[in-house]
């Protein structure tokens, strides 16, 4: 009893803080989403119209959700596998292990604005690296204004997004890999397992809690991603690279649709929560299988 | 060897002591100043960059004012334009705007602030003499529902800037009409020059193109009628949209304009990589900046006329929108008014001297520092009879957003001129 009380006393400050700066604002946003409000002046109650609009009739927002799903897909199926392979190589005791670990982590600590500026220069149509390279190898006809083209702009923002955070996932997986006891690998080796079998039958199952965390980070990170797109294209040209958060930002701060923007913010929160729940459920199943083995 | 626990406790103790001393010094400062009954005015503005000459002038002006008004202390706070906009929006959404006087450049926003009673009408404070010393028409943007909310600072006008050297090399003529513009674009592209550099990534800069064409097609008065909600868009507005599409199709803006911001576009022109730029008169300063390679090679012209259009050379885009306003929550309305008047008048003069804008007051301005481009602009705008404001500064934010989306759709050829007009008219409903 005494213990329980002391636990609650120690939890209380952070719980209060958390409620104050995260939980309450979400409910306030949900409430503001019920109004038509320019941010200044009178608020007009319109019920669920904002929510209806964003779910059923706002094509820009729908397109932005598609984009965020593509980004999430690219994160899970391109970024994480690359990170996993690099983490495997790093943890297998290559030379200059520490050096490579640091190098891969550098983009993570750089500000997104810096990364955006860097990649803006890479994709620049006149003096950009990509076009210069294409021209240098005689493929000049494929050189194009990458960020000014509605078909390519979004892809051009996905590439740096993936590149930027690979280092973070390498580090998470690398520490997970280091935590797997060597004895298990040795035992498998004695039983005659080859490298492929050891990776798929031992390493991946034992790493699955770590992989789960990585997938949750990658998915929710994609759903609420904002900075790179905002700095590189600001959702343009003509909404082709829009993400839910950039649409929300435009509505809140430049389109004078504070109520509608709030509704979108609530949608993003719910979307992230649902994604987390689904991933948890999927992994619960596979983890149960692992422990059964 | 100090244990981690000890280290943490030392740090905590240190933080506590620091906190105490911070409190005590604040307290002692507070008691000493309250005995002198000093009035503090908080001022927000958007000259945040140290390299900006206006910031220097502003600081000088404030220093002067504090000297001549010893009982007044001015506390200034500045942010860069976009961040400043966000700050205004959020601060006035609640009642948390902790300032007495603040800078604004958007009559649309001024209007919504006035309607919700967030800014102070100055009718009770302003005198006849003050009203007589501002230029004619310079108060229009600050009159709302029969009340006056501010005094003018300075104005700007949209111009066509041409790089004479590139025009000569391409054998093209600096355009005064739309047909000449198309012709020049073709000749310049054929030579491999970028005809017009436009910062289309920044929606307001994209809108400049449509707005000047709409003004030339319909005349400034018709545009003002539309902006005031007195009339709908007619055929002339569709014709202007058609011309934007035509310009895009002849490659007038090059192929990467959608990824070019306004600042980038400014640099592209001032480094001699483009032949034309349609921009506000403030851009004259950029052409004479230290890193400009086009000094002395640039002509400023009125934006091209349209054959058969109703707008003539006495019509301009631009006008008086910039000024300081007073927060209605201020505890010192009289002092805030006095400072607002002073800072608008003083900055108007500084801006005019530095050839960055035209003074809103009938004061003598030292023109000795004016560059050639500025003289051209002063000359042509002296003919100005009617002007339209930039639409995004006049319309409320919802309509501005709709307008910007429609114009961007023209740039990517995703909308017909007819649908453009339909959409624009629908944004009023």
Image (cartoon, rainbow, N blue to C red):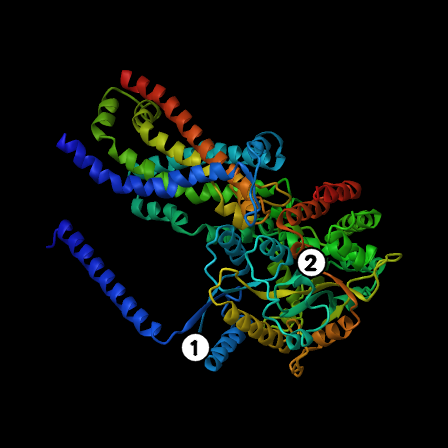
Which quarter of the rendered picture does the C terminus of chain B lie within? top right
Q: Which mark is residue B390?
A: 2
Q: Residue at x 25, y 24 (%)?
A: A189
Residue B71's label in the rendered image is 1
**Subunit of label 1:** B
Q: CA distance from mark 2 to mark 1?
A: 40 Å
Q: Which is more toward the observer, A114 or A266?
A: A266
Q: Is residue B166 left or right of residue B270?
A: right
Q: Residue at x 72, y 77 (%)?
A: B375
Label 1: element kind: loop
Between B224 and A226, the one lying in front of the other is B224
Q: Residue at x 58, y 72 (%)?
A: B341
The percent coordinates of residue A164 (x first, y second) are 44, 45
Q: In the shown orientation, is residue B60 left or right of residue A103?
A: right
Picture disc at residue B94: none
The residue marked by circle 2 belongs to what chain? Answer: B
- The image shows residue A232 at horizontal and vertical percentages of 54, 49
Mark toward the viewer: 2 or 1: 1
In the rendered structure, which disc, 2 or 1, sits on the residue that comes first in sequence? 1
Q: Are marks 2 and 1 on the same chain?
A: yes
Q: Quadrant of residue A203?
A: top left
Q: Secondary structure at mark 2?
A: loop
User: Measuring 79% from the left and 59% from the top, which residue is drawn there?
Assistant: B220
């Amino acid at each position: 009893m005494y213990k329980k009380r002391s636990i609650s006393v120690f939890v209380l400050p952070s719980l209060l803080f958390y409620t104050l700066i995260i939980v309450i604002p979400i409910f306030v946003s949900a409430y503001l989403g019920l109004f038509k409000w320019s941010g200044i002046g009178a608020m007009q109650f319109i019920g669920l119209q904002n929510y209806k609009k964003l779910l059923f009739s706002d094509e820009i927002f729908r397109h932005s959700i598609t984009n965020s799903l593509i980004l999430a897909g690219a994160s899970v199926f391109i970024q994480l596998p690359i990170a996993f392979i690099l983490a495997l190589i790093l943890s297998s005791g290559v030379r200059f292990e520490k050096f490579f670990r640091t190098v891969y982590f550098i983009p993570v600590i750089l500000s997104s604005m810096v990364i955006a500026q860097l990649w803006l220069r890479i994709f620049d149509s006149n003096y950009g690296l990509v076009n210069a390279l294409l021209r240098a190898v005689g493929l000049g006809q494929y050189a194009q204004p990458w960020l000014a083209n509605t078909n390519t702009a979004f892809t051009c923002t996905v590439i740096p997004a993936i590149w930027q955070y690979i280092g973070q996932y390498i580090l998470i997986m690398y520490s997970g890999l280091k935590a797997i006891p060597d004895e298990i690998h040795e035992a498998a080796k004695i039983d005659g397992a080859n490298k492929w079998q050891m990776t798929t039958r031992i390493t991946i199952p034992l790493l699955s809690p770590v992989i789960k965390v990585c997938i949750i980070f990658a998915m929710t990170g994609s759903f609420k991603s904002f900075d790179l797109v905002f700095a590189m294209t600001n959702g343009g040209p003509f909404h082709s690279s829009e993400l839910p958060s950039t649409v929300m930002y435009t509505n809140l701060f430049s389109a004078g649709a504070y109520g509608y923007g709030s509704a979108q913010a609530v949608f993003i929160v719910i979307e992230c929560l649902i994604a987390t729940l689904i991933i948890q459920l999927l992994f619960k199943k596979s983890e149960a299988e692992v422990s059964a083995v | 060897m100090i244990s981690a626990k000890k280290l943490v406790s030392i740090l905590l103790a240190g933080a506590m002591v620091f906190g105490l001393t911070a409190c005590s010094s604040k307290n002692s400062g507070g008691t000493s100043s309250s005995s002198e009954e000093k009035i503090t005015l908080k001022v927000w503005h958007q000259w945040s960059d140290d390299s900006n000459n206006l910031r220097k002038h502003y600081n000088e002006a404030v220093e002067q004012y504090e000297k001549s008004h010893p009982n007044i202390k001015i506390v200034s706070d500045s942010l860069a334009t976009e961040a400043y906009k966000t700050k205004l929006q959020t601060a006035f959404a609640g009642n948390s705007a902790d300032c007495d006087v603040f800078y604004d450049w958007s009559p649309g926003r001024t209007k919504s602030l006035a309607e919700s009673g967030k800014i102070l009408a100055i009718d009770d404070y302003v005198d006849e003499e003050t009203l007589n010393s501002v230029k004619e028409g310079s108060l229009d943007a600050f009159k709302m529902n029969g009340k006056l909310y501010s005094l003018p600072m300075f104005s700007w006008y949209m111009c066509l800037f041409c790089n004479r050297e590139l025009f000569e090399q391409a054998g093209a003529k600096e355009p005064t009409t739309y047909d000449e513009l198309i012709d020049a674009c073709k000749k310049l592209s054929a030579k491999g020059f970028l005809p017009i550099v436009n910062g289309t990534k920044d929606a307001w800069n994209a809108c400049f193109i449509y707005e000047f064409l709409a003004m030339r097609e319909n005349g400034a008065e018709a545009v003002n009628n539309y902006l005031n909600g007195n009339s709908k868009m007619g055929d002339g507005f569709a014709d202007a949209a058609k011309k934007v599409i035509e310009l895009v199709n002849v490659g007038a803006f090059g192929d990467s304009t959608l990824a070019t911001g306004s600042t980038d576009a400014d640099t592209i022109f001032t480094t001699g990589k483009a032949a034309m730029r349609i921009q506000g008169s403030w851009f004259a300063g950029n052409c004479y900046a230290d890193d400009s390679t086009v000094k002395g090679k640039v002509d400023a012209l009125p934006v091209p006329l349209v054959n058969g259009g109703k707008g003539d050379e006495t019509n301009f885009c631009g006008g008086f929108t910039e000024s300081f306003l007073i927060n209605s929550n201020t505890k010192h309305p009289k002092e805030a008014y006095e400072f607002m008047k002073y800072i608008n008048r003083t900055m108007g003069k500084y801006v005019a001297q530095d050839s960055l804008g035209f003074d809103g007051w009938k004061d003598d301005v030292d023109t000795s520092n004016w560059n050639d481009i500025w003289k051209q602009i002063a000359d042509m705008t002296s003919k100005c009879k009617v002007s339209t404001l930039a639409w995004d500064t006049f319309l409320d934010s919802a309509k501005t957003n709709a307008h910007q989306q429609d114009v961007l759709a023209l740039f990517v050829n995703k909308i017909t001129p007819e649908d453009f007009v339909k959409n624009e008219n629908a944004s009023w409903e």
